[in-house]
Image (tube, rainbow, N blue to C red):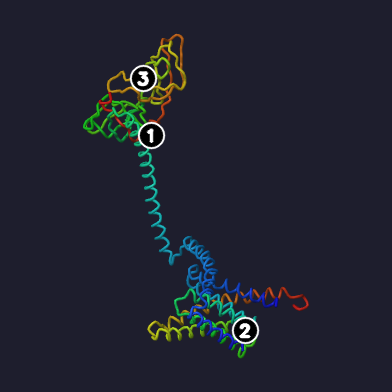
Amino acid sequence: MMYSIVRAVGIIALVLISTVIFISQKTLLNFPYNQIHVIFIILTFLLFFAPLSASMWYSVIVAFILELYALTPFGVLTFALVASAIIGHMVFQRFLTNFSFISLATTLLIILVSNRVILLFLSVLVSGTFADVSLFFELVHVSWEFVMSTGVLFLVYFLVRHFYRLARPEYVRR
Amino acid sequence: MTVFVFVIFFVMLVVLHYIGAIGWVERTGLRIINPLIHVVYKQNVKIRTLTETFSSTQELVARLEELQSRVNQLEHLEATSAVLLVENEELKKQLNFFRQHENYRWVTCNVVGETIEERTSGVILDCGTRDAIAVGQAVVAGEGVLVGKVVEANEVSSVVRLLNDSKSRVAVSVLNKDRSIGIAEGGFGISVQVTHIPQSEELSEGNTVITSGLEEYMPRGLVVGSLETITRESYQPFQRGVIRVPLDYQKLIIVSVVTVDAL
């Protein structure tokens, strides 16, 4: 019971922090630093280190809040984020299976690409035309998002690993 | 199983949104998130304003030059404003004085320079005989403070001898109990003294000195200053006092010349 409450509070805190950062960073940082995708970085970590339900709750609540600030029809962002979280989870469970940084980065890439593809697909479906779609622009955009987010992911991953190792007892470290 | 549950949850969420059943949840979410975003956004805008970025050195240099030019313009504007402010204050004082003395007629003139001779104290005005200026007329500044007399007047300009000039002589009256009559004389451009007051009359520090109105073109009641120190020599028939003038004669920018109708 206590564990569930702590987990719920943790997820809500993560949701609040990541949505505020995500919405605000576009005005604060210049290109390419504003391409760091905080939500996908957190989602990737959750997929690795938390149960699937935590990732799903996080995705649904974050996407639900983002829907309130988006111009796209309600449901598109939520569907895209939840679907990409499920795809990321499946890839991690079935193909990657280890906790290395390469696995983390690959999962992030899969989440980013799948999210972008689903969003594109849904926007074409909603608008009924390809006129607004530029594949080259999308490719460049995803590439920058991946490069910048991977950089942050790398930093956080090694910081977490370093401090996690330090926190363990001496006999475990040996 | 988890995936299936969340897919159902997602579908329900969308349906409930479109039928308006979760409007209160959305409003609550916005009420929580909006203040947070607003705080961050305000800080972002502040930081953006402080940290303007440049794409090249040339752009930075150009911006620097532009700003330097703007600073120069603003400095000039600031100096102009300061002068205008002083002029405005001075004009207000003079206008106030003449409003209280409706029998006076006056001409307001700009001080355009000082007289060039050494050991003299005078200023040049940009108004002359075409503005009804005549030799001997009183020149005032501030709220009716006499600063000198017109000693030369041509059509477009005139010369004023200030009270502290060595050759300046003005008939004055001291506001003591005897209402003493004397002469205000200049002292080498640095002081004004009142002289020719008999020893029998009592002068004290702080007595106001005004014009007596006993000479041509000079109305009675213009303030000259107040007595600062008084000197009595037993072997001399008259006593004298140094007058503290209420204005700095070297900072005159606008003065008014009281014309003949004032008499």
Q: Which quadrant is the C terminus of chain A positioned in?
A: bottom right
Judge the density around disc 2: few (<14), some (14-19), many (≥20) Cα neighbours within 10 Å.
some
Bin the neighbour count of mark 1 within 10 Å (Cα to Cα): few under 14, some 14-19, many 20 and up.
Answer: few
Q: Position of residue A21 (x, y in %)?
A: 54, 70
Q: How many marks?
A: 3
Percent x, y of residue B35: 53, 66
The quadrant where residue B68 appears? bottom left
The chain identifier of the residue carrying mark 3 reads B
Give the number of the disc on residue B118: none
Foreground mark, 3 or 2? 2
Among all residues in the image, which is located at the extreme bottom? A94
In the image, residue B253 lies at what x, y percent?
A: 34, 35
Q: What is the residue that sits farthest to the top in this orientation?
A: B235
The reply to whether dot 3 and dot 1 touch (C-beta < 8 Å) is no
Q: Quadrant of residue A128?
A: bottom left
What distance separates the C-alpha of mark 3 from that of mark 2? Answer: 103 Å
* Mark 3 Cα shell of 10 Å, populated few (<14), some (14-19), many (≥20): many
Disc 3 target residue: B172
Q: Check the image and report above or below for B200 versus B207.
A: above
- Disc 1: which residue: B251
Q: Nearer the viewer, mark 1 or mark 2?
A: 2
> Looking at the picture, which amino acid does disc 2 mark?
Leu
Can residue A9 be spotted in the picture?
Answer: yes
Q: Which residue is mark 2?
A: A52
